Image (cartoon, grey):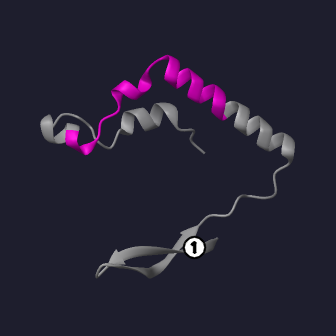
């Protein structure tokens, strides 16, 4: 695990705010693994766009209009994001 710094705006100026832990990959990947991962990602994105899944996404403003709208999109994430 390594850390990356980030900045935030305070007092009208950007200031270094702290360190955010960033997980390193499990190891070096080969070009073939990267290409396969990219191809899989593109295929998933194409499928989502063709089925118009983005229409089901809600943001917090939608939630303010209708409290039943799940602005965290947990159902969408569970369906779309891979689990590890």
**1 is within the stretch colored magenta:** no
Q: Is residue 3 left or right of residue 55?
A: right
| Residue 58, position as x, y percentages in the image | 30, 36
Q: Callout 1 environment at 10 Å: few (<14), some (14 to 19), or many (20+)?
A: few
Q: Main secondary structure of the magenta part?
A: helix
What is the span of residues highlighted in magenta in the rendered image? 41-61
In this picture, residue 55 sits left or right of residue 83 = left
Q: Please report the residue visible at 57 percent of the width from the left and 73 percent of the height from the top.
A: 4
Q: Is residue 52 magenta?
A: yes
Q: Nearer the viewer, residue 4 or 16?
A: 16
Tell me the residue that label 1 is attached to.
4
Quadrant showing the N terminus = bottom right
Q: Nearer the viewer, residue 72 or 15?
A: 15
Residue 10 lies in what quarter of the image?
bottom left
Residue 54 left/right relative to 12: right
Residue at x 28% of width, y 82% of height: 11
Q: Residue at x 79, y 58 (%)?
A: 27
In this view, 32 is above or below 79? below
For the C terminus, the image quarter is top right
In the image, residue 48 above or below residue 17 = above
Element at label 1: strand
Question: Residue at (55%, 71%) from the top-left corner?
Answer: 21
Is 74 rendered above or below residue 18?
above
Report x, y in % for residue 37. Answer: 72, 38
Percent across and percent down for residue 59 are 29, 41
């Amino acid at each position: 695990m390594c850390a990356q710094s980030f900045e935030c705006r305070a007092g009208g100026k950007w200031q270094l705010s702290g360190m955010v832990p960033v997980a390193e990959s499990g190891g070096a990947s080969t070009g073939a693994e990267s290409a396969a991962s990219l191809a899989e990602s593109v295929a998933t994105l194409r499928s989502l766009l063709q089925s118009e899944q983005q229409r089901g996404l809600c943001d917090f403003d939608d939630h303010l209009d209708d409290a039943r709208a799940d602005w965290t999109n947990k159902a969408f994430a569970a369906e779309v994001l891979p689990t590890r």
